[in-house]
Amino acid sequence: MYDRTFGTDWEEADLTREAAIDRAFALGVAAGCGSARPEELDRILEAFPGAYERSMIELAYDEGRTKALEAPREEPEAVWEELVDGVGTPRTPPLPAAFPGALSELTVTRSPRTGPPSSLDLPRFLRK
C-alpha cells in the first residue's frame, strides 16, 4: 500500500516537512493495517535532525496508526482507502489542528504590551 502510493526512491534533500508528515501518517496507517515499515520511518526521521520536526513526524505516524486501528473495517485495503487518498494525501489532517500553530501562541513570540501594567501583572508582594 505505502510503496505503491509513495514509493521509496526519494532523496532527503527533496523531502519537505509537510511531505514527511504525510508519509509518516501513511506509514502509521500501513502499520495499523499490518504492513509496518520501520526502516522507512527511520529514514524519514533521519532527514530531519531537529527535535521539533522529528516530534511532528512521530506524532503523525502515531495518529495514522491509531486511526487505522480504530477503523471498523477488517480489510486492510479498505482501511487504507478510507484514510489515505490515491495520491498519498491523508483524508483527515494528520496532526491536530491546534498543534502546528502552538508555537505562535507562546507569549514569548508576542510583542510586549504597551502602557502601564495593570494590577493583575504585579506580583502580590508589590500590590500592598
Image (cartoon, grey):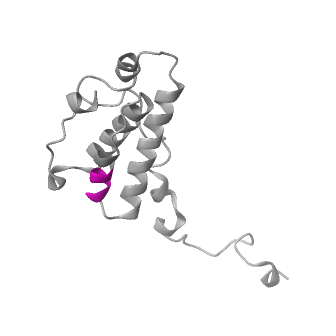
96 falls in the magenta region:
no
Q: Quadrant of the N terminus?
A: top left
Q: Would you place residue 82 above or below residue 48 in this image?
A: above
Q: Would residue 47 be found to the left or right of residue 128 on screen?
A: left
**Which of the two residues, 30 or 19, is positioned nearer the viewer here?**
30
Q: Would residue 55 be found to the left or right of residue 88 on screen?
A: right
Return the x and y of residue 32 as percentages of the image width and height. 44, 31
Q: Quadrant of the C terminus?
A: bottom right
Q: Residue sitting at 23 percent across and 32 percent down?
A: 3
Q: Which residues are magenta?
A: 42-47
**Which of the two residues, 75 or 13, is positioned nearer the viewer here?**
75
Q: Quadrant of residue 29?
A: top left
Q: Would you place residue 78 above or below residue 93 in this image?
A: above
Q: Residue sitting at 15 percent across and 56 percent down?
A: 13
Q: Quadrant of residue 125?
A: bottom right
Number of labelled discs? 0
Q: Would you place residue 98 above or below residue 120 in this image?
A: above
